[in-house]
Amino acid sequence: MITGIKRFFDQMIATNAGQSAPVAERALQVATAALLLETMRMDDRIAPEETAAVAATLRRQFGLDAAALAELLELAEQEARQATDYYQFTALINAGCDAAQKARILEYMWQIAHADGHLDAHEQHLLRKIADLLYVSRADYVAAKQRARANVAAHGPAGPG
């Protein structure tokens, strides 16, 4: 497990001057996907609506085709399974995103939490924790939650498009 985490930091999170934009973008995609997967796993069962919402959100957010989406989900699954906490993901997002982008990621997480029609206390706890780690203000946290709830109500769990 230590080797996997070290590899993740070495390959994905290391932000040195020589890091290429595609590597940084890929690392941000993995971090976002891992947080969405963690949101999906927070309650007692993984509903098909949650799985569909994760895939639709990642496809839409990053413009991925089916093969790229499958690869991203597999990598995010591996990294999330090996992670000991959420900091390695939120640190990357903090380094690569502005406040509006971080609020948008939180909104996606809320959409996943609402996708199965039931908002679990564990999901709420995770989202509050991630909001704190991403330094999302209370107002932006509440606004992201409301936008996600409205989006799921209007368009279903997978959202528009």
Image: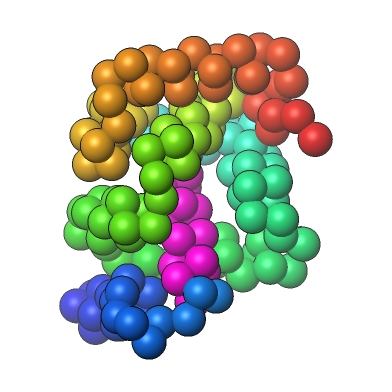
Check residue 33 for magenta coloring: yes
The answer to whether residue 45 of the structure is visible from this angle is no
Image quarter for residue 132? top left
What is the quadrant of residue 72 in the picture? bottom right
Instruction: Establish if 159 lies above or below 8.
Output: above
By what rule are the colours in the image chosen? Answer: rainbow
Quarter of the figure that contains the C terminus: top right
> Does residue 110 appear left or right of residue 55 in this picture?
left
Residue in front for this viewpoint, 112 or 60 = 60
- Which residue occupies the extreme front position in the image? 17
Q: Work out which quarter of the rendered image holds the N terminus and state it.
A: bottom left
Q: Is residue 136 above or below residue 83?
A: above
Residue sitting at 36 percent across and 53 percent down? 93
Count the marks: 0
Name the residue furthest bottom: 18
Image quadrant where residue 106 sits: top left
Classify residue 41 as left or right of residue 122: right
Residue shown at 28% from the left, 25% from the top:
137
Vertical comparison of 35 with 155: above or below: below
**Height in image: 25 above or below 135?**
below
Rendering coords of residue 12 (x, y %): 38, 74
Is residue 22 highlighted in magenta?
no
Q: What stretch is highlighted in magenta?
A: 23-38
Q: Would residue 3 be seen by someone viewing this image from the given angle?
A: yes
Image location of residue 46, percent across then percent down:
52, 37
